[in-house]
DNA sequence: AGTTTCGGCGCC
DNA sequence: AAAGGGCGCCGAAACT
């Protein structure tokens, strides 16, 4: 391994040294407070395995992704080698196939030999990245973004190593309560088989409730036309098969996605070990690989149990998205209600919906998600009157998205131009459309992208792109803030036994000895407020959390 | 037979 | 007309 100390300008401030052992090198340099490396995901797990943590890092390939996005060059190869090629003017190598998409004190840069670039080349890329930060719309924010995302990479790697405390016994008990006995041969458990029989009995013929086509046909024979078997549509259907059918679907879901085989696959030694991927989505939200860690059903959370003598500190941000909208739009009225820790939806409803909290919440979420029909529209008008700048902010984002312009989060994460933007632009320019692959659900090439219904923002539907961009600025800026929260919380836990074990968009779980719990609760509060100030600058907006100290995740709510 | 898409649901 | 955003996961269906 080569290693070089960096000066404050990011350039080498000392000689390059050869180090045989990565972990030992890090251990022997406690003066280094920020390690610059090509890829956290490739370097840091090895360090953790050797029992070494680092305080801060700078992930060059992750920064490259964010910088390329900001420059409107999404999709260009993001590897350090590609960045170097662009810098030197050579042929740009494509990214290796299965890589995931996302991935004052003295600093130090290093690169494992034989894996990536020579240190001098990596250093050149790094130095150029520093210059590219300066050329962004808000260099200070962009620096904060790449730093925060790098911190997120560290947190993710540490969470992957820690795992989520999981009681297989409790899980099995829950499964048995819900689903009944398992039958030999891997077929449906007892309760599902019973419900399937009830459904069939109600229809008077054999119907498989797990086959939507079968169910639609059965309803048609009963004289009831249903367009799908979605819960919301079936709920209003008057037929004796509906109740057991809905119950079946609910339990079936538990069985296939979080049942016994899930337990077998994902839980070992008292820990559920999904792979968290920081920045795995375009909005900056995290994703997980395997185990559906971000979709653990509420009933299954009973299996998340702290070690003996330990506790789970479960913390959930209160009304995060409207608070973020207040912070980024600077709407005076919304900032005022978001400046209180009390229920924001209640405050909004007091001002604009004569006390109807549910309506206020629908209106706010409708504005953020781009609702186009139903009560949302009526409510949106009331919202617009009282909080004009907030609504205008997301409206402008939607317009930009529809027109194919770049849209950014508060810190500068940039929305990729939707797949449909180019062809729409070409269409406006009168160019032919000849790639049917771009129109998966559309008609013949050349047909207006807005005709017909096409799911997904990347389908060539400009309204869908508008909704995506509208949501992107809020969801993405919330993700910006959440990264800073995680970074602060991680630092606060540094000298405790407490460890972050779970993160889900606006919710964190810290696993800690009982006597550290109150300290952790306070640390979360402080980290949230600090994250607010760091991310959005001086703002009256508060970011309160609901925290619970529990032994079992399911007891947190 | 292997791969991709669809339908439906879980979470935020 | 409940056609609002982001995801992952699973089996079945559809495709090659």
Image (spheres, coloured by chain):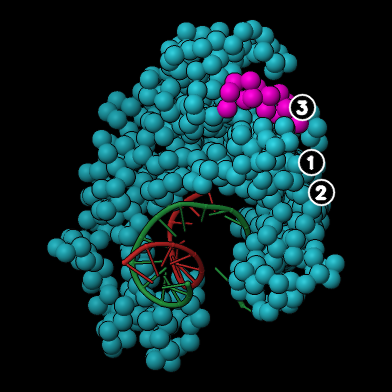
Chain colours: A cyan, B red, C green
Q: Position of residue A99 (x, y in %)?
A: 51, 43
Q: Is residue A135 above or below residue A475?
A: above
Q: Nearer the viewer, residue A343 or A12?
A: A12
For the record, the magenta segment spans A117-132
Is A531 one of the magenta-colored residues? no
Secondary structure of the residue carrying tag 2 is helix
Which quadrant of the view contains residue A361?
bottom right
In the picture of the structure, the residue carrying the numbered disc 1 is A330
Which quadrant of the view contains residue A433?
bottom right
Which quadrant of the view contains residue A66?
top right
Residue A144, numbered label: none
Residue found at the far right of this picture: A429
Magenta portion: prevailing SS class: helix
Chain of the residue under the numbered disc 1 shown in the image: A
Chain of the residue under the numbered disc 2 shown in the image: A
Label whose residue precedes the other's in the sequence (1 or 2) = 1
Res. A163 visible in picture: yes
Label 3: how many Cα within 10 Å (few below 14, some 14–19, many 20+): few
- The image quadrant where one finds the C terminus of chain A is top left
Residue A389, numbered label: 2
Residue drawn at point x = 59 percent, y = 21 percent: A119
Residue drawn at point x = 25 percent, y = 48 percent: A264
Q: Position of residue A218 (x, y in %)?
A: 37, 86
Q: CA distance from mark 1 to mark 2?
A: 7 Å
């Amino acid at each position: 391994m080569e290693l070089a100390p960096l000066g404050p300008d990011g350039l080498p401030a000392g000689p390059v040294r050869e180090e045989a052992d990565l972990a030992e090198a890090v251990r022997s340099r406690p003066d280094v407070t920020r390690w610059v490396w090509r890829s956290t995901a490739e370097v840091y797990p090895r360090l953790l395995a050797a029992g070494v943590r680092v305080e801060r890092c700078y992930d060059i390939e992750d920064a490259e992704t964010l910088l390329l996005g900001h420059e409107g060059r999404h999709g260009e190869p993001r590897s350090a080698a590609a960045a170097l090629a662009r810098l030197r003017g050579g042929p740009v190598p494509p990214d290796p196939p299965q890589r995931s998409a996302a991935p004052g004190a003295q600093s130090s840069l290093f690169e494992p030999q034989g894996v990536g670039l020579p240190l001098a080349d990596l250093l050149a890329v790094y130095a150029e990245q520093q210059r590219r930060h300066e050329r962004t719309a808000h260099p200070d924010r962009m620096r904060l973004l790449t730093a925060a995302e790098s911190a997120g990479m560290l947190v993710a790697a540490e969470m992957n190593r820690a795992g989520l405390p999981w009681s297989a016994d409790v899980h099995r008990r829950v499964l048995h309560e819900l689903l009944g006995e398992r039958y030999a041969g891997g077929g449906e458990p007892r309760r599902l088989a019973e419900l399937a029989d009830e459904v069939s009995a109600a229809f008077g013929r054999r119907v498989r409730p797990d086959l939507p086509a079968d169910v639609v046909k059965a309803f048609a024979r009963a004289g009831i036309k249903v367009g799908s078997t979605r819960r919301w549509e079936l709920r209003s259907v008057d037929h004796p098969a509906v109740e057991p059918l809905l119950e079946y679907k609910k339990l079936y879901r538990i069985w296939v996605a979080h049942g016994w085989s899930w337990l077998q696959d994902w839980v070992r030694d008292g820990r559920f070990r999904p792979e968290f991927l920081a920045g795995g989505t375009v909005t900056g939200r995290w994703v997980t690989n395997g185990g559906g860690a971000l979709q653990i059903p509420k009933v299954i959370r009973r299996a998340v149990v702290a070690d003996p003598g330990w506790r789970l500190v479960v913390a959930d941000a209160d009304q995060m998205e409207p608070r973020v909208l207040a912070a980024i739009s600077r709407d005076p009225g919304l900032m005022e209600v978001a400046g209180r820790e009390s229920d924001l939806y209640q405050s909004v409803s007091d001002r604009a919906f004569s006390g109807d909290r549910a309506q206020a919440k629908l209106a706010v979420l409708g504005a953020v998600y781009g609702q186009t029909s139903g009560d949302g529209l009526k409510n949106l008008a009331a919202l617009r009157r009282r909080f004009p700048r907030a609504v205008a902010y997301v409206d402008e984002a939607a317009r930009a998205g529809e027109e194919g312009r770049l849209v950014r989060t508060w810190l500068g994460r940039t929305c990729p131009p939707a797949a449909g933007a180019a062809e729409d632009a070409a269409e406006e320019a009168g160019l032919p459309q000849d790639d049917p692959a771009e129109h998966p659900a559309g008609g013949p090439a050349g047909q207006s992208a807005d005709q017909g219904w096409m799911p997904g923002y990347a389908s060539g539907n400009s309204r869908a792109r508008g909704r995506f961009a509208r949501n992107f600025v809020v969801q993405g800026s919330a993700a910006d803030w959440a990264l800073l929260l995680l970074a602060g919380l991680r630092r606060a836990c540094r000298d405790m036994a407490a460890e972050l074990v779970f993160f889900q968009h606006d919710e964190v779980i810290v696993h800690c000895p009982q006597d550290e719990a109150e300290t952790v609760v306070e640390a979360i509060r402080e980290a949230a407020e600090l994250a607010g100030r760091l991310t959005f600058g001086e703002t009256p907006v508060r970011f309160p959390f609901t925290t619970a100290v529990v032994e079992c995740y399911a007891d947190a709510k």
